[in-house]
Amino acid sequence: MRAAADVLVESGYTGFTVDRVAARAGVGRATVYRRWPTKLDLVVALLRDLRDSFVLPDAGSLEADVRALFEGVADSATAGERVMAALASETFNDGELFQVLGDEFIAPRRAQLSVLFGRAAERGELREDVDITALVNMTWGFLWQRRFINGLGVDRAAVDGFLLVLLGGIRAAPGG
């Protein structure tokens, strides 16, 4: 999977081939083709591997959870982010890849973030009228806007600013 991720990030989806992955991994191409007959099959396996390696923080409070979530991406893009970025532009021209990326990477990440905000709601940290889907979109958008659109890191000051705005708008009133 590491070889697949490296080739995908370096070559994009168009230049991504099972042959290149086999060469990078130092195995015969038949070895790879037996498990993943097409490059899309290999991408699905890679996205599932990345999905399964993600650990959702559970630090006891929404603020601590969001800090822990962003801590892992502070200085450089994670493997999942690099793969996602390599695939994202290709989805405009490839409906099947669009569906796979949505099903195997984006939807599971959105679900995980929903769990994070759902736990905060259960702890009484959020106002009752807060839209969890909107929180997921804002959090995901903050990361992608900083990292991939503006080319900025996700440093402590950025996270502090994000949390100030986010928590200021969604926190439950003390005592209720």
Image (cartoon, grey):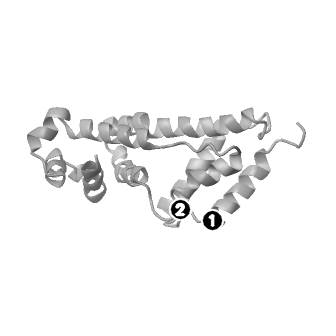
Q: Where is residue 108 in the image (x, y as percent from the top left)?
A: 48, 36
Q: What residue type is labelled 2?
A: Ala
Residue 156, label in figure: 1
Q: Residue at x 43, y 55 (%)?
A: 78
User: On the rendered structure, is 129 left or right of 154?
Assistant: right
Q: Which residue is drawn at 53% across and 66% down?
A: 153
Q: Which residue lies furthest to the right in this view?
A: 175
* Image quadrant in which the C terminus is located: top right
Q: Where is residue 111 in the image (x, y as percent from the top left)?
A: 54, 35
> Is the residue 124 above or below the residue 81 in the image?
above
Q: Which residue is drawn at 63% across and 54% down?
A: 67
Dot 1 and dot 2 residues touching (CB under 8 Å)? yes
Secondary structure beneath dot 1 equals: helix
Q: Which of 15 and 43 is in front in this view?
A: 43
Secondary structure beneath dot 2 equals: loop
Residue designated by label 2: 74
User: On the rendered structure, is 71 left or right of 120?
Assistant: left
Q: Where is residue 116 in the image (x, y as percent from the top left)?
A: 62, 39
Q: Give the mark nearest the N terminus, 1 or 2.
A: 2
Q: What residue type is labelled 1?
A: Arg
Q: Residue at x 71, y 45 (%)?
A: 61
Q: Where is residue 145 in the image (x, y as percent from the top left)?
A: 54, 58
How far apart are the alpha carbons under marks 1 and 2?
8 Å
> Is the residue 44 above or below the residue 28 in the image?
above
Residue 137, label in figure: none
